[in-house]
């Protein structure tokens, strides 16, 4: 079985985000990037499937900041092949999906699994858009995958913990919400070894033109903090104030 | 292109989901402002009785097909694309929900229509759409190219009451070619009953990533016990298997409305906010003064959890 896992780097939200000078995007110069956490889950599920019943796992990504490191980290975790798509920039999911579809069309695959969403996919989630460019079926918000022969059983999560189960034939594209295990950790030394022992295959993006899009006029921070009355002071002072509040509201 | 605004109706087990009424309410406001027509798109099998709850819409387009008896990502995608293609509405509203995430992007590609996701606001002329991105830390305003747009709406962005109108809008039936499906519905799996039903608790002590390790959970549990409440959490805690799914608040978890929601180390991603923003009293504790949770909390505390929790516990 061949599994392709598209991954991408996204801004680390733990860091302060700044807006660029024309007010339409993040100031990307000093952004700290990290692997999209849902992609990490997609990769984990693919590697678990490989360990269960054998599969070739190909990790694919668009060129960008720190992407080589992310690909080598995937290799260190157990991915078999690494592919980097060059010649595409910007952050439109449609363009990214088209570039991925161009590259994937020439590859053998049964299942494509990627993160269900990312923090910056303003024009939609990658999995479904990629599926439709490839002409494949698709399920999003997936929390379980069992493959056998040319078919897969997929668990999809609704709200409130309700789960729907579907049976589908391959090829299929899945947007992964959570792997069945916490994504594995890989030490830096192992990533360095993978960097020496594995190679990243580079593929040109091809035509990524999309006619139907939307243009950003403004990026701005929501009024953070405006909603809450902030309680200052030491932890002790704050705890006292909370006790007063709870007493006023008749909670304690 | 017509002057229609489509709302794709989401229903599960015979019940129309709140997101549908939220979109109908917003859609009606926009249709009234622009002289357009609000149309509810209902898919199902023998489900036309639901049209009576869709009175906010001027018309219901109903696709009845055995393949739509249960939600099926592929069948829904095909059916929505089919009615959109036949009518060319100027706007299609779809929930940014588990179901909507299967549909909106696919229809966008199949019909070559711009798609704007994570909408938390839409100008009444439909020209400017606000998306909540970067875990709720940034808003982005954008405008679609062309005359038509698909928008996926974050649950809880618009009031549901405005769209909850009984009535008997005219029902127009439509058909869609749903042959060749490669995905089949098998079953619905109900959530396992938990030890505690967090939707029934008056006091919830909710932990997020800031709790750092499952070894720190007893601190929060002790606080919950002293306050007479229960522990709930955000999604990463469930993904890490520190707490069970039955404790999860948010989009893929449960919606709660306790008297007190004490959020400990929860940053406040839109998916979490969806599940708790209606709590009577929200107190958030976080080390990051810019955490989006403070937008929704009534009271905010910027403090290290491991200083704050013992301080509060000590007073109870």
Image (cartoon, helix red, strand yellow):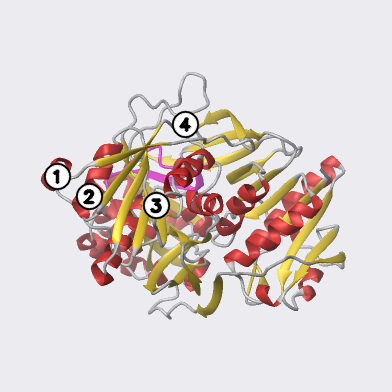
Image mark 4: chain: A
Q: Of tags 2 and 3, which is closer to the observer?
A: 3
The reply to whether discs 2 and 1 touch (Cβ–Cβ < 8 Å) is: yes
Residue B88: x %, y % from top left: 78, 48
Residue B293: x %, y % from top left: 44, 47
Q: Of tags 4 and 1, which is closer to the observer?
A: 1
Q: Considering the image in quadrants, where does the N terminus of chain B appear?
A: top right
Q: Report the residue marked by disc 3.
A: A107
User: Does dot 3 land on a helix, a strand or a loop?
Assistant: loop
Left or right of residue A206: residue B9: right
Label 3 and label 4 in one chain:
yes
Residue B276: x %, y % from top left: 50, 58
Q: Report the residue marked by disc 2.
A: A75
Image mark 1: chain: A
The tag earlier along the polypeptide, 2 or 3, is: 2
The tag earlier along the polypeptide, 3 or 4, is: 4
Q: Report the residue marked by disc 1.
A: A197
**Residue B292 figure quarter:** top left
């Amino acid at each position: 079985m061949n599994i392709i896992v598209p991954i991408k780097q996204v801004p680390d939200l733990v860091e302060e985000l700044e807006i660029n000078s024309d007010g339409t995007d993040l100031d990307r110069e000093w952004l700290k990037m990290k692997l999209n956490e849902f992609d990490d889950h997609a990769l984990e599920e693919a590697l678990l499937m490989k360990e269960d019943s054998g599969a070739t796992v190909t990790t694919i990504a668009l060129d960008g900041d720190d992407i080589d490191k992310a690909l080598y980290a995937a290799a260190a975790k157990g991915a078999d092949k690494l592919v980097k798509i060059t010649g595409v920039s910007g952050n439109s999911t449609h363009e990214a999906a088209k570039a991925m579809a161009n590259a994937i069309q020439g590859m053998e695959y049964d299942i494509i699994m990627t993160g269900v969403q990312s923090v910056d996919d303003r024009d939609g989630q990658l999995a479904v858009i990629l599926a439709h460019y490839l002409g494949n079926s698709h399920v999003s918000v997936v929390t379980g995958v069992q493959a056998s022969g040319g078919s897969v059983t997929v668990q999809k999560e609704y709200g409130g913990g309700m789960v729907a189960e579907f049976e589908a034939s391959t090829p299929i594209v899945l947007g992964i919400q959570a792997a069945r295990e916490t994504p594995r950790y890989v030490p830096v030394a192992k990533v360095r070894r993978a960097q020496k022992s594995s190679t990243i295959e580079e593929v040109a993006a091809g035509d990524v033109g999309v006619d139907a899009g939307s243009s950003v006029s403004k990026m701005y921070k929501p009024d953070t903090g405006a909603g809450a009355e902030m309680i200052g002071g030491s932890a002790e002072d704050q705890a006292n104030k909370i006790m007063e509040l709870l007493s006023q509201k008749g909670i304690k | 292109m017509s002057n229609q605004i489509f709302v794709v109706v989401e229903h599960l087990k015979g019940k129309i989901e709140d997101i549908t009424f939220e979109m109908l309410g917003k859609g009606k406001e926009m249709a009234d402002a622009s002289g357009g027509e609000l149309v509810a798109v209902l898919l199902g099998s023998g489900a036309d009785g639901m049209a009576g709850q869709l009175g906010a819409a001027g018309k219901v387009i109903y696709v009845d097909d055995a393949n739509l008896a249960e939600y099926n990502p592929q069948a829904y995608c095909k059916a929505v694309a089919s009615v959109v293609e036949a009518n060319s509405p100027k706007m299609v509203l779809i929930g940014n929900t588990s179901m909507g995430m299967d549909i909106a992007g696919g229809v966008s590609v199949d019909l070559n229509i711009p798609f704007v996701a994570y909408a938390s606001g839409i100008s009444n002329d439909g020209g400017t759409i606000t998306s909540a991105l970067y875990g709720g830390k940034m808003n982005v305003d954008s405008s679609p190219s062309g005359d038509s747009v698909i928008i996926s709406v974050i649950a809880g962005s618009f009031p549901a009451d405005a769209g909850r109108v009984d009535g008997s809008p005219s029902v127009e039936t439509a058909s869609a070619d749903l042959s060749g499906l490669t995905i089949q519905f098998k079953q619905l799996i109900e959530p396992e009953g938990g030890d505690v039903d967090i939707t029934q608790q008056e006091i919830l002590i909710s932990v997020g990533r800031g709790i750092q390790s499952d070894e720190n959970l007893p601190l929060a549990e002790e606080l919950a016990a002293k306050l007479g409440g229960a522990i709930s959490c955000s999604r990463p805690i469930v993904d890490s298997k520190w707490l069970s799914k039955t404790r999860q608040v948010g989009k893929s978890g449960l919606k709660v409305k306790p008297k007190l929601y004490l959020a400990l180390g929860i940053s406040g991603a839109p998916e979490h906010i969806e599940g708790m923003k209606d709590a009577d009293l929200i107190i958030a504790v976080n080390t990051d003064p810019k955490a989006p949770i403070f937008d929704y909390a009534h009271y905010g505390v910027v403090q290290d959890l491991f200083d704050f929790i013992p301080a509060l516990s000590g007073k109870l």
